[in-house]
Amino acid sequence: MKKDDLIQKWLRNELTNEEQAAFNTLDDANFLEEIIQEGQRFKADKHISTPSFESLNNRLSSKKTTSTNWLLVVSKIAAVFIIGLGIFYFFNNGQATVFNTQYAESKTIILPDNSIVELNEFSHLEYNSSTWKKHRSLQLQGEAFFDVEKGMRFDVKTKNGIVSVLGTEFNVLDRDSIFKVSCYEGLVQVSYKNKITKLPVGKELSIIKGVEQNTSTILSQPKWLKNMSTFENVLLSDVVAELEQQYNIKVQLNIQNNDLKFTGAFTNNNLERALKSITLPFNLSYEINNKQRVIIWDEQQ
């Protein structure tokens, strides 16, 4: 039987015992078996390194063959093998695990190391599960509470800074002009503009419009987990912005003093109560025109 016919039948797994013996005597038999073995290893090993097409093609060209068709057949095998590896890596290493929350929605997320994330509303979190064992790192936009299992360094990356721990409970808020980190257990390291700050239990770091503040908290967890938003010495305009986020409304703030700062909290499940919590300390009035629009004004105007 001709060499090309043997190869074609071998590819279809149709060789008889006699033909298999003839195939084994071919100069290229070992090389063909090597391709099959590589294919099997590719299926079993997620971390296999892929040879370049040029190097594989050179190996094909270096083999002594008497048929142009044979070179074409093996080249196709190699090309399919490389494409398969590329597709495998694209889907297994290039995809991020992503979570998003909308208005009045929160999510509990279990990370690959069993660390727990409570993701607040209007927030975005993502991480690469394929590299998690080597790099416990994720991206956060919005707010989340973390209960981290002990282990390697754990990084929460935001647009304003990086929060790093080995195992602890902490809260991160990164929204608009507010970046706030609160430590409830263990020790937290915050990197912000090339400066490193370490927060022990009960300490908070707030950076509002570039102004840094170090404060304390006696809470065991953030109040938003109990449908509360809390503030300490925060501009009223920023408090109102949070109110808009929580209730999906638009607030028109008409006050003379734009430097008013608020310390306190408002509930996230009753708009009337929330507005009273914000306005009463400053003797402000409010009016709810409809479910989507609120006006707050100063009585002295």
Image (cartoon, helix red, strand yellow):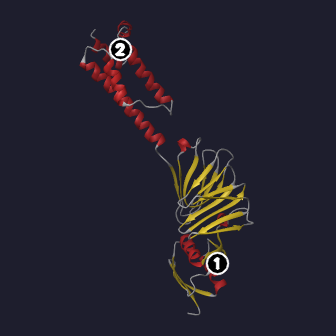
* Residue 28 circle label: 2
- The x, y position of residue 271, in whole percent, is 59, 76
- Tag 1, which secondary structure? strand
> Which residue in the protein does label 1 denote?
262
Label 2: few (<14), some or many (≥20) within 10 Å?
some
Q: Residue at x 27, y 10 (%)?
A: 2
- The x, y position of residue 45, in whole percent, is 51, 30
Label 1: few (<14), some or many (≥20) within 10 Å?
many
Q: Residue at x 41, y 29 (%)?
A: 51
Q: Amino acid at mark 1?
A: Phe
Left or right placement of residue 298 versus residue 264 in this view: left
The quarter of the picture where residue 242 lies is bottom right
- The x, y position of residue 153, in whole percent, is 64, 47
Residue in front for this viewpoint, 269 or 83: 83
In this rendering, is residue 11 above or below 167? above
Q: How far apart in space, not on screen, are marks 1 and 2 (Cα)?
A: 80 Å
* Residue placed furthest toward the left: 68
Q: Residue at x 59, y 75 (%)?
A: 239
Q: Amino acid at mark 2?
A: Asp
In this rendering, is residue 294 above or below 102? below
In this rendering, is residue 200 above or below 177? above
* Residue placed furthest toward the bottom: 300
Left or right placement of residue 93 versus residue 14 in this view: right
